[in-house]
Image (cartoon, rainbow, N blue to C red):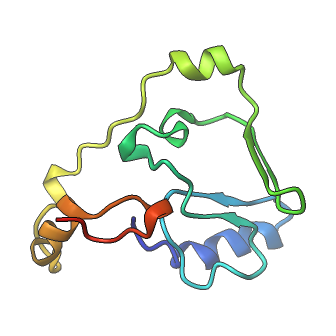
Amino acid sequence: MPELHALTPVLGSLQDRGFRVALVTDGRMSGASGKVPTAIHVTPEAAAGGAIARVRDGDVIRLDAAENQLDVLVDPAELSRRAPANADLSAHACGIGRELFAAFRRHVGPADTGAAVVV
């Protein structure tokens, strides 16, 4: 569940240039309330095979905060045929203190149950 707060200025800049921008992520984001519409902590997460792992570049996503709806506008059969994306993050396991949190990453639960460490 990476921290995505560094994206806020970039996304805000795109909005200022006339682009319609929203952020949809299974990660977390400090300061998520603001001018960029966001859907955070989407579950199940991509690493757990959630639908977000099947979204591809060019897919249209509808985010309707008033109706509490998040839809991928792709034929459901097409979406189910896609293999979930699987990022190889092994090269980033060490450095910048990551090794200190490796045990937490191995044992943390999903966001919808509190992202608590389960032993």
Q: Position of residue 104 (x, y in %)?
A: 20, 70
Q: Position of residue 31 (x, y in %)?
A: 61, 85
Residue at image location 10% in from the left, 72% down from the top: 99
> Looking at the figure, which quarter contains the N terminus?
bottom left
Residue at image location 59% in from the left, 64% down from the top: 40
Residue at the far right: name it.
66
Q: Is residue 66 left or right of residue 111?
A: right
Q: Is residue 93 left or right of residue 56?
A: left
Residue 9, placed above or below residue 17: below
Residue 16, placed above or below residue 80: below
Residue 56, placed above or below residue 69: above
Quarter of the image where one finds residue 56: top right
Q: Is residue 18 left or right of residue 10?
A: right
Residue 25, placed above or below residue 100: above
Q: Position of residue 57 (x, y in %)?
A: 59, 36
Please tell me how many numbered marks the rendered image carries: 0
Q: Is residue 13 left or right of residue 108?
A: right
Residue at image location 31% in from the left, 43% down from the top: 87
Q: Nearer the viewer, residue 112 or 104?
A: 112
Q: Position of residue 111 (x, y in %)?
A: 45, 63
> Looking at the figure, which quarter contains the C terminus?
bottom left
